[in-house]
């Protein structure tokens, strides 16, 4: 595809253009007699020094940027600075971000001790370094048209959205998604209930509830089990106001989209309270050709113009600080959804209700071998009903197909910050999954009812422990390493093993798994404006209960069965990257190679032995295969003119697997791997006004996995416009997406959904959005 080559060449050329400027960028010289310096100790409020903290220093006069790292004594130093105003920023995991502005005089040696406060919600441990980390802030999430987390986070290089419907979209990192990613909400796990993956974890948080999202790409986090392909950490807002504060947001858009929300806070020096509410609804969207996407779902006459979704969320948090080194927090969120319509499936969501409850306590004690202790417990539940009451497939019946699913995820974890840069932790969680289906068929004018138990009362217990190490080696090197061990026991003893026996020759209804994970990473600050990163990580994830124990003998006229004999997959990945800055010019390439052992693929399993009641000679099932994936990301920022900046990113991944002809696994292409994609933003800002012109160009994906019934995806280009105004209290933003009304679809298939009807959803056509945010009061500290 010529446009793909053109985009790749353009960004590569930009990289070469940037390189000379970066190479010639000079660090501030410490040899000039009249230059100034900044130094100090970084510590927490109890006096404990913090090694390995990253300090960013920005010059208001020259727009220069420098980065230094604290040594083992928590000390940092930057010399050779000119007189003027500087902003110092410290962003350290487990602590609230600190920003400080100072003015330097010629020849001044300024001592600037930096004291960090314990974060409102402490992330248990930061065990990653270098360019594998990415994510979105609250401002970035709200400055756009994203209706859920899946849509919002696709702005991150190497992260893709999986289109489910008008809402409830999933997240993929380099094409790895769902079971291959770990997703947590303030450290708590949540799994969608639907066995057809209607409701991914990311759907069950409202954007107005989110403070920021961190994305770890690859197997470089040992603090949480299952981060084989990456880790999505969703951190929600926490109360920290002294006094009263209120923020509201209203979003409207094409296709009847409507989303008002509000968050209120109140607090004293020791007690803080937060409450929020959001309502979201929309009609079906139209594609680039102007057709309603509902036309793909075979809805009954008169049901094509229904609401595509209706969701409301309410959340509350109570935090208390009995001392300067302690913080406790209790939170509860309720999400209720009705009429969640999925045209690519044979059924829709009649309702989908989620409850999230979390309690945590953080304690810092620097003058002992345990510097800090973090404990949390959580209870999460999802109740989900899907049926075909709106579809023509129901015929003359009100409903002919339905499935009631309940999912619980309960867990606890304890993390301790130890001396010498060590962190140790223990994690336990239990997952319960119960799915019951009903099928009604008319036989000689009489309804015949069949009940199925696709996942009857399956439980999975996981225990894991880890040890992580983070150490500054002088002021230029940061070493992180970690190891983890996990054990899992899955019990599906209530399942009927007939299908397992027929297609896999086993009657097993339980499974034990265990394995080690680990990584080593080194970041080298080669200069004030350049850094290099290298690392190797190896992580496992346990087979999902659906992949092992799902049973259905009527899905799309063919049996669908899990494989109890699956082995847990492992990803061993090698990463190399660097970042270089020259004034406001930044270039960050990253390269990766993954050895994917025992990755789980979908295939057509032949019947091995005849079993009473099993009639299909072939079933959709799961198998382990050996695979590889490689690629990289390139991000670049550059000033074009006064007030105008350009940001671009390029991501590419290629995956292969080893065929197994004896098992009907014939394709050598790895499933669900994204094609090459580039995103370029041109941003203009003047005082409180800003505008953004953006382009997304995606290449053709013809490296498809025919074993998973993937379809080739045509390349496309999409152009978006955005205009906004903001001050301390008000932000107004409007935009036009898909300016040219292009007709296109995302690359990911729906082959792994036992209830998919074979339809591929197109993306929305030309559409507009408007966001209005207003803050009634500032939070004072």
Image (spheres, rainbow, N blue to C red):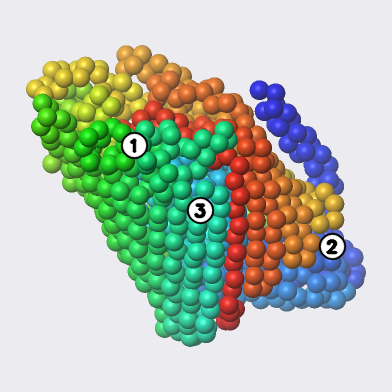
The percent coordinates of residue 354 (x first, y second) are 33, 57
Q: Secondary structure at mark 3?
A: strand
Q: Residues within 10 Å of mark 2 (few under 14, many from 20)?
A: few
User: What is the distance, in whole Å, between disc 1 and disc 3 at their CAs?
Assistant: 23 Å
Q: What is the quadrant of residue 300 in the picture?
A: top left
Q: What is the quadrant of residue 326 in the picture?
A: bottom left
Name the residue tied to disc 3.
257
Q: Residues within 10 Å of mark 1 (few under 14, many from 20)?
A: some
Marked residue nearer the N-terminal end (1 or 2): 2
381 to 705, vertically: above or below: below
Labelled pair 1, 2 in contact (Cβ < 8 Å): no
Name the residue tied to disc 2.
62
The percent coordinates of residue 583 (x first, y second) are 80, 55
Q: Nearer the viewer, residue 140 or 398?
A: 398
Q: Residue furthest front?
A: 302
- Tell me what residue is drawn at x 80 percent, y 53 percent: 644
Q: Nearer the viewer, mark 1 or mark 2?
A: 1
728 vs 309, left or right, is right
In the picture, which quadrant includes the C terminus?
A: bottom right
Q: Nearer the viewer, mark 3 or mark 2?
A: 3
User: What is the distance, in whole Å, between disc 3 and disc 2 at their CAs?
Assistant: 44 Å
The percent coordinates of residue 69 (x first, y second) are 65, 61
Residue 348 seen from this side: yes
Q: Nearer the viewer, residue 25 or 717?
A: 717
Q: Residue furthest right?
A: 33
- Tell me what residue is drawn at x 20 percent, y 19 percent: 616
Name the residue tied to disc 1.
300
Q: Secondary structure at mark 1?
A: loop
190 to 392, vertically: above or below: below
**Total marks in image:** 3
- Tell me what residue is drawn at x 62 percent, y 31 percent: 716
């Amino acid at each position: 595809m010529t446009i793909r080559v053109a985009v790749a060449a353009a960004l590569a050329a930009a990289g070469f253009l940037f390189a000379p400027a970066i190479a010639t960028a000079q660090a501030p010289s410490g040899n000039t007699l009249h230059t100034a310096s900044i130094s100090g100790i970084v510590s927490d409020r109890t006096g404990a020094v913090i090694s390995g903290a990253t300090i960013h220093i920005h010059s208001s006069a020259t727009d220069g940027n420098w980065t230094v790292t604290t040594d083992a004594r928590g000390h940092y130093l930057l010399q050779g600075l000119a007189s003027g105003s500087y902003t110092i920023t410290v962003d350290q995991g487990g602590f609230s971000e600190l920003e400080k502005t100072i003015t330097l005089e010629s020849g001044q040696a300024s001592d600037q001790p930096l004291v960090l406060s314990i974060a409102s919600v402490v992330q248990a441990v930061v065990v990653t370094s270098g360019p594998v980390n990415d994510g979105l802030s609250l401002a970035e999430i709200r400055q756009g048209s994203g209706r859920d987390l899946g849509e919002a986070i696709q702005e991150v290089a190497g992260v893709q959205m999986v289109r489910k419907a008008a809402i409830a979209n999933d997240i993929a990192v380099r094409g790895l998604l769902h079971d291959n990613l770990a997703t947590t909400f303030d450290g708590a796990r949540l799994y969608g209930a639907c066995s057809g993956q209607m409701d991914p974890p990311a759907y069950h948080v409202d954007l107005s509830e989110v403070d920021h999202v961190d994305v770890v790409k690859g197997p470089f986090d040992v603090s949480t089990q299952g981060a084989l392909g990456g880790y999505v950490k969703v951190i929600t807002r926490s109360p920290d106001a002294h006094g009263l504060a209120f923020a509201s947001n209203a979003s409207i858009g094409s296709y009847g989209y409507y989303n008002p929300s509000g968050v209120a806070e109140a607090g004293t020096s020791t007690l803080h309270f937060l409450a929020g509410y959001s309502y979201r609804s929309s009609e079906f969207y139209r594609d680039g050709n102007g057709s309603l996407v509902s036309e793909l779902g075979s809805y009954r006459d008169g049901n094509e113009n229904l609401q595509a979704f209706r969701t409301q969320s309410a959340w509350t948090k109570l935090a208390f600080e009995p001392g300067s080194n302690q913080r406790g927090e209790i939170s509860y969120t309720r999400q209720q959804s009705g009429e969640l319509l999925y045209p690519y499936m044979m059924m829709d969501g009649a309702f989908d209700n989620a409850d999230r409850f979390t309690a945590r306590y953080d304690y810092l004690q620097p003058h002992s071998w345990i510097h800090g202790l973090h404990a949390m417990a959580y209870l999460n539940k999802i109740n989900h009903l899907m049926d075909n009451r709106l579809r023509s497939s129901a015929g003359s019946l009100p409903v002919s197909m339905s499935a009631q699913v309940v999912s619980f995820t309960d867990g606890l974890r304890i993390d301790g910050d130890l001396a010498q840069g060590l962190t140790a932790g223990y994690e336990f969680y239990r997952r319960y999954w119960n799915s019951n289906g009903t099928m009604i068929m008319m036989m000689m004018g009489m309804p015949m009812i069949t009940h199925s138990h696709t996942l009857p009362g399956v439980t999975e217990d996981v225990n894991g422990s880890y040890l992580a190490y983070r150490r500054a080696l002088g002021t230029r090197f940061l070493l992180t390493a970690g190891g983890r061990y996990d054990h899992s026991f899955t019990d599906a003893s209530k399942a009927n093993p007939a299908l397992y026996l027929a297609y896999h020759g086993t009657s097993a209804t339980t499974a034990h798994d265990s394995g080690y994970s680990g990584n080593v990473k080194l970041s080298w600050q080669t200069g004030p404006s350049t850094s290099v990163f290298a690392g190797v990580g190896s992580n496992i994830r346990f087979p999902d209960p659906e992949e092992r124990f799902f049973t259905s003998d009527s899905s799309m006229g063919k049996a669908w069965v899990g494989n109890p004999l699956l082995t847990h997959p492992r990803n061993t990945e090698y990463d190399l990257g660097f970042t270089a800055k020259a004034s406001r010019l930044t270039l960050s390439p990253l390269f990766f190679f993954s050895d994917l052992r025992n990755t789980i693929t979908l295939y057509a399993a032949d019947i091995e032995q005849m079993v009473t009641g099993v009639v299909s000679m072939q079933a959709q099932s799961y198998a382990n295969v050996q695979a590889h994936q490689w690629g990289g990301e390139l991000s670049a920022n550059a000033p074009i003119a006064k007030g105008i900046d350009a940001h671009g990113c390029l991501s590419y991944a290629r995956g292969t697997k080893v065929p197994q002809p004896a098992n009907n696994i014939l394709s050598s292409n790895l499933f669900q791997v994204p094609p090459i994609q580039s995103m370029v933003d041109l941003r203009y800002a003047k005082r409180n006004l800003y505008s953004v012109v953006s382009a997304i160009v995606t290449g053709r994906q013809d490296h498809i996995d025919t074993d998973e019934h993937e379809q080739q995806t045509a390349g496309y280009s999409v152009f978006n416009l955005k205009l906004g105004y903001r001050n301390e209290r008000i932000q107004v933003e409007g935009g036009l997406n898909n300016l040219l009304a292009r007709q296109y679809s995302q690359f990911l298939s729906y082959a792994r959904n036992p209830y998919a009807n074979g339809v591929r959803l197109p993306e929305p056509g030309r559409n507009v959005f408007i966001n209005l945010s207003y803050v009634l009061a500032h939070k004072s500290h």
